[in-house]
Image: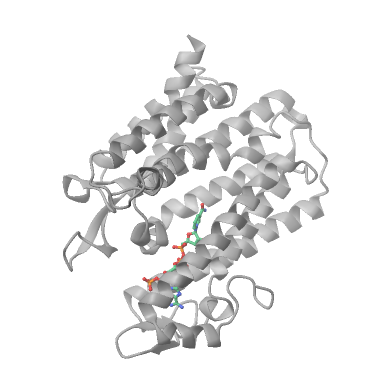
Amino acid sequence: MDFILGFFTPILIYALIFALNALLPGRWVTGYVNKPNSEEKMIYHLNGFPVFSILFLIWFLFGYFDVVPFDYLYNHRWHGLAGAFVLGTVFTLGVVLPYPPVRKSFFKDLFLGRIENLQHWGGRVDAKMWLYLAGATMLGLNALSFTAHHWILYREHASTGILLSTILIIYFVIDYLIFEDVHLFTYDLFAERIGFKLGWGCMVFYPYFYSIFLWTTADLPDPQTPVWLLAIYVLIFFVGWILARGANMQKYFFKRNPGKVFLGIVPEAITNGDKTLLVNGFWGISRHINYLGEILMATGIILCTGYPTLIWPWLYPLYYVVLLFMRQRDDDKRCSLKYGELWKTYVKKVPYRIIPYIY
Ligand code: NDP
């Protein structure tokens, strides 16, 4: 019985997120991607932060009134992972099989998807934005529950570092949800289709792998990391956040209104008369400083747990290194095709791909 309940928990949570996303009021935002076979932009209904807040409240109230223990998701993490795994697989098949093939290989289609964008009820629910909301919310709930387990085990001897790493990952989740509309301008939205990578990735990998640093340290005792070292780890996180959030916001404002000053930075751009590229501020440091930011944030988070010699927490930032270094190469190719000579000028002006003076 326990297994069955644990198995169905993420499925219930995802269903609730779907209902709240569709039914709660939200902001109607014009995106960056065009509607299929049209010059008109897609419209999105965004309410990620209120949806997450309601789920958080349910988790808290259920725990507080002893309906469901605070650490239920930790105690049933393997059952939950199995449930999410099955749902993610069924979702992938359901979102790929009904659509016509786009590649010769069926398995490539299954992995990378066939349909580019999928919306229902006039944009009230958008598959990609729902997937990111579902993954982010489930990651937040897992992190809270895993840390609750640590707290229940150790109480006054609980590790400040574990609590801190949870605060930072929740900050990461809330930051994404508050700036959800900025995500409409990102690679996943304009360059990817919905298949295993995005569907299964958001339902299974995102919430269960990104929490690996807590999954593997929540039952360990306080490593007694000195406060000054914790302060450095938090600093690493926030330096990363400034780079990632700053670059994303500068590009977002530039795309919305090319003349708008951001954080006192007057946008400087190169143009071929038709297309323009930003060349100053965050986009003048390296061509993907936001990727470095993302890696630093993950590094700060896992270091806070206080077990730097344990390999498992490191898998989280290492995954980012692999994903983002590969993505930078793909994006460079895409931009080179889209912008032609203008991209070559940008590369000459800003030669570093991700890490200034190194790479
Ligand atoms: P970017 O936000 O960097 O988007 C790249 C696109 O921006 C390019 O294809 C191009 O598209 C445009 N662009 C590139 N250079 C310039 C320039 N100089 N001036 C104007 N436009 C430019 O990358 P992603 O979409 O991959 O990532 C978005 C965010 O999401 C990043 O912060 C990333 O780190 C984060 N992310 C987070 C992940 C996570 O799991 N936490 C995973 C992956 C990404 P166009 O010209 O068509 O606008």
> Is the residue 272 above or below the residue 145 in the image?
below
Q: Is residue 177 visible?
A: yes
Q: Which residue of the protein is positioned furthest toward the top in this rendering?
A: 1
- The part of the image, by quadrant, that contains residue 274 is bottom left
Q: Is residue 296 left or right of residue 15?
A: right
Query: As rendered, which of 155 and 191 lies closer to the eye?
Result: 191
> Is the residue 199 above or below the residue 227 in the image?
above
Q: Is residue 228 left or right of residue 333?
A: right
User: Residue shown at 62%/30% (left/top)?
Assistant: 148
The C terminus: image quadrant: bottom right
| Residue 104 at x, y percent in the picture | 33, 50
Query: As rendered, which of 5 and 330 lies closer to the eye?
Result: 330
| Residue 132 at x, y percent in the picture | 41, 47
User: Residue shown at 35%/81% (left/top)?
Assistant: 258
Q: Is residue 14 left or right of residue 300?
A: left
User: Residue shown at 77%/44% (left/top)?
Assistant: 306
| Residue 144 at x, y percent in the picture | 57, 35
User: Residue shown at 74%/42% (left/top)?
Assistant: 311
Q: Is residue 47 visible?
A: no
- What's the colour scheme? one colour
Query: As rendered, which of 111 and 304 lies closer to the eye?
Result: 111
> Is the residue 310 above or below the residue 72 in the image?
below
Ligand 1's quadrant is: bottom left
